[in-house]
């Protein structure tokens, strides 16, 4: 076998191995059949897909989070859109347990430093303590 053939074969095998998408949990049901024609990264390592599928995943992750579902998909890398709409203190506890990152809960509009840190997540809440913005590293 030629060196060129082996490199091509290795490239194909690597591409297939790393392009495998995660399976959606069975309790979520079927993903949407009609989707928008855009392509974006999906939450929690589900690969790429439409904003319709992204919203569907986020909705189910949020429901699982609120119900503390035993088969909850843990989003370890962020951003974490599934936390929008839940209590900031609950989001902090779960996110810090899942990721091991330093998590801060701040009132929306609070002054913050401008440094960017990959070991920190800031969660912004409204006056009722509900997460208003998508938490992300920084």
Image (cartoon, rainbow, N blue to C red):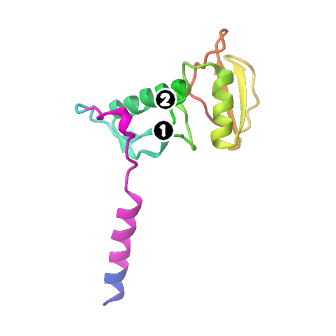
Question: What residue appears at the point 30 percent right and 35 percent down from the top-left corner?
Answer: 31
Residue 41 on image: x %, y % = 42, 42
Q: Is residue 8 left or right of residue 85?
A: left
User: Magenta span covers which residues?
Assistant: 7-32
From the viewer's perspective, is 131 left or right of 106?
left
> Residue 124 or 44: which is nearer the viewer?
44
Q: Earlier in the sequence, mark 2 or mark 1?
A: 2
Instruction: Using the rendered view, name the quadrant where residue 128 is placed.
Output: top right
Q: Residue at x 64, y 13 (%)?
A: 126
Q: Is residue 101 left or right of residue 30?
A: right
Which element is circle 1 on? loop
* Residue 64: mark in rendering: 2
Q: Position of residue 44 (x, y in %)?
A: 49, 41
Residue 77 lies left or right of residue 102; in this view the side is left
Whether the magenta-drawn stretch holds residue 110 is answered as no
Secondary structure beneath dot 2 equals helix
Considering the image in quadrants, where does the C terminus appear?
top right
Question: In the image shown, does 125 or 59 lie closer to the viewer?
Answer: 59
Residue at left 54%, top 40%?
A: 74
Relative to 127, is 117 above or below?
below
* Tally of numbered tags: 2
- Please name the residue that numbered disc 1 is placed on: 71
């Amino acid at each position: 076998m030629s060196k060129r053939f082996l490199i091509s074969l290795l490239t194909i095998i690597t591409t297939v191995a790393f392009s495998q998408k995660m399976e959606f949990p069975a309790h979520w049901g079927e993903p949407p059949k009609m989707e928008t024609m855009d392509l974006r990264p999906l939450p929690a390592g589900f690969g790429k897909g439409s904003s319709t599928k992204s919203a569907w995943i986020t909705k189910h992750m949020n429901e699982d989070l609120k119900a503390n579902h035993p088969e909850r998909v843990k989003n370890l890398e962020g951003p974490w859109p599934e936390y929008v709409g839940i209590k900031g203190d609950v989001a902090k506890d779960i996110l810090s347990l899942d990721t091991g990152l330093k998590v801060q809960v701040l009132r929306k509009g609070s002054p913050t430093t401008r440094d960017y840190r990959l070991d920190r997540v800031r969660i912004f809440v409204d006056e009722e303590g509900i997460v208003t913005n998508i938490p992300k590293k920084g």
